[in-house]
Image (cartoon, rainbow, N blue to C red):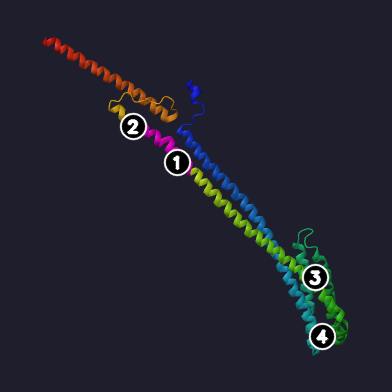
Amino acid sequence: MNDIQNVGVMTIKAKILCLVAAFALLAATITGLSLKTMSDYNRIIAEYRHNSENAFRGERLNRLIGASAIEMRGVYLSESRAEELFQADRVEQRVAALEAFLNDWQTHLRPGELPELTLVRTDVMKTVKGGRYLAKLTREQGLPAADAYGNKDKYRISREAMQGRIDTMVSDLDAKLAVSQAELQKFQENRQSQFLLMAVSGILMLLGGSLWIAIDAIATPLARVRESMVRISEGAYDTEIPSQSRGEIGELWTALGILKDRAAEADRLSREQLEEEHRLRELVLD
């Protein structure tokens, strides 16, 4: 029967161990969330950096195209042979830098990424090829030949169309960067809220559990035990001892019950002895 009554009863030790387990579970949960946060954060940061680099390269492509156009224009505006040759070298350098930049950018792209760059690259390589030929004509035949070759409206129209495609691509890259920035900010805000909610909820639950153990399982039962001990010490041997208590407090009640019974027995024997002595004294006097 006692075994049946003990089923499902938690001792103070078991309750404290459950509380410790809850602390451990909370710590493990926070650790798991932290690891996932680090993984997600690294992924988002990597995407943000990649988009940022693409946006930067798009802007740099714009600057290189503009610089190449300026150097080519400088050839047409040259006022001396020395200036023609100088500008031809500058054009050669600019288009070489432009080609190297495009080749380098291509190596940093993911498979299938930025397909619009393929069309832009075709246009840019035409500019590179035209710039080199312009520099060659300038060196070998002089300004008149270079001007007749390159200083035409159709080339200007072609460059404007290319610039429009580049501007569109750069705008798309900037938009992707803005999306990455927004995702990063949202991620940070959400994770902060999650950590705060988890921490507050965990602290409140653990605090509630601690108070429950301290008050319901320890303080209140011990106060009842103390009150009963005082009453028994004052001779109130009819003090009720709970018979259904289990765990450490139940052991205290059991010990107190034994103490009460022995104290009551000792008090009874003492009274009987006094009564016997009183009876014998009366017999002697008679």
- In space, the residues marked 1 and 4 are separated at their CA atoms by 88 Å
- Front residue of 106/38: it is 38
Residue 76 badge: 4
Query: Circle 4 — which element?
Result: helix
Disc 2: which residue: 227
Q: Main secondary structure of the magenta part?
A: helix
Q: Is residue 88 visible?
A: no
- In space, the residues marked 2 and 1 are separated at their CA atoms by 22 Å
- In space, the residues marked 3 and 4 are separated at their CA atoms by 26 Å
Question: In percent of the image, x 44 and y 35: which residue is there?
Answer: 217
Which residues, given as a range, are shown in magenta? Answer: 207-224
Reply yes or no: does residue 203 show up in magenta: no
Query: Circle 1 — which element?
Result: helix
Question: In percent of the image, x 85 and y 73: which residue is there?
Answer: 126
- In space, the residues marked 3 and 2 are separated at their CA atoms by 90 Å
Q: Residue 264: give x, y in percent of width and height.
A: 30, 21
Q: Residue 252: give x, y in percent of width and height.
A: 38, 28
> Looking at the picture, which amino acid does disc 3 mark?
Arg
